[in-house]
Amino acid sequence: MSDERVVDPEGAYLWDGWGTCLSWWANTELGARDDLAAALFGLDAAGVKTSSRGIELPGLGLNIVRYNLGACTWTDGSAMVESPAIVRRKQIETYHDGEAWNWSADPNQRSMLARARDAGADTFEMFSVSPPWWMTVNRNPSGAERGEQDNLEFQYQDAFARYIAAVARRARDDWGIRFSSVEPFNEPSLTAWHARQNQEGCHFTIGAQEAVIEYLRRALDDHGLGDVLIAASDECRYADAVVTWQKFTEGAKRLIGRVNVHAYEPDERGRSRTELREAVGEEIPIWQSEYSEGEPDGLAMALSISRDIRYLRPTGWVCWQPVEALDWGLLDGEYDDRTPNPDGGAPGTLEGEVGGVNTKYHVLAHYTRHIRPGMRILRSGHTNTVAAHDPSARRLALVTVNDGRKRTVTYDLRPLTRDANAARVWVTDAIDAPGARRYARRPDADSRDGLLTVVHEANTVTTMEIDGI
């Protein structure tokens, strides 16, 4: 099979970068691992220690870090209620127990936050999954008794906003971390957040979201953080985000500096993504702020990235847990979620190891290493190809996923140049088989009269990088 794709600079937009959330994996002792910081946030080759051996990986160069502001405390006399289904690593420690501040809380996540910065990350966002337990209706940070009920006490809406602003100011002044944005909600429209589910969570009605957003803007300004934007609302699905945005008042919309949305809706034809972009408009940026699934080969992830960039046109793309069990992570996480926790009712400890690497780590490397912050995203002419241009380096990057059979693709670069250099090529086979290539350098591909023709084997992700454009 063969097809042609025209790479067109019309409508190009600026790329903020790629990122990951800290949360559960960095809440464990993995948050103190320099090798993981180097692999995830640096660009140099990094040696990573696994439970059985050492492996060398290409650095992903993730530059966006999302820090999870916690909701749990275990101080003397604490009346926090714990879900019977939650495990310790999914409980994030908060800095205030309702009576006093504890700025030594959450050491592992803060450790990785600093390590990420030192390894090269430069864009930081703080997000809340649940308000601190003592601000909730039932004292349970996993959610209300019924999932359709809001769990933030009405009387604490302002206090919740001021808590977020206080931590952001502390991070700037004492941690050396400047959060450029804060997100007070996480999938707020879902009815899955209830007192017996297995993580932290909180439902918010539209009215409650609007109130918190207004209080938060005021609190940030009062703390001297007028340059910190509010992102909202981190809905689970694109269609949910459309409904939420359309229901917001114009006043609430004016206080939102960026729309965040999660990618748990397949949306293969891009209809919901397109509707969200059209609803929000071109002036307000969008991040795809959380993506994950349990498929280790990376094809589903690559297809989701391609659809996001074609239809949603986000400026940033973020994965959820880079180190997680059951093939949900880029790296396989091994955690103790069964041993009783001595400091609370939830089972498990904060121990953790890396079991190995999934193919999708190498798949993501194609995008993160070659489509860098500050590049311009171009129209590629095809859903499965992402095109980006670096004006200062005069370099074009094309990343294509082929989830079908072998095909020959001709990339028409004539809207950009008719005299392109040869293309450097990297390939990952998204299969588990002897001899499968993992972000492997391949022979250069020649172009002629502005046309670049490349053969893509079945189930591959291929990067083509061309200088002089």
Image: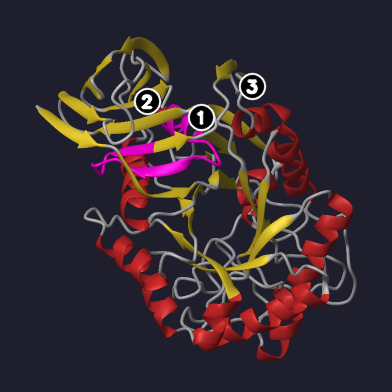
The amino acid at mark 3 is Lys
Q: Say whether residue 328 is visible.
A: yes
Q: Earlier in the sequence, mark 2 or mark 1?
A: 1
25 relative position to 401: left or right: right
1 relative position to 56: left or right: left
Q: Which mark is residue 463?
A: 2
Asked if disc 2 and disc 1 are in contact, CB closer than 8 Å, the reply is: yes
Q: Nearer the viewer, residue 283 or 142?
A: 283
Q: Nearer the viewer, residue 110 or 165?
A: 165
Residue farthest toward the left in the current orientation of the protein: 1
410 relative position to 373: left or right: left
Residue identified by numbered label 3: 49
- Cα–Cα span, label 2 and label 1: 10 Å
Write down the region rendered in magenta: 360-387
The amino acid at mark 1 is Arg
437 relative position to 170: left or right: left
The amino acid at mark 2 is Thr
Quadrant of the drawing holding the N terminus: top left
- Cα–Cα span, label 2 and label 3: 27 Å
- Within 10 Å of the Cα at label 1, are there few (<14), some (14-19), or many (20+) other Cα atoms? some
- Within 10 Å of the Cα at label 2, are there few (<14), some (14-19), or many (20+) other Cα atoms? many
- The x, y position of residue 435, in whole percent, is 33, 10
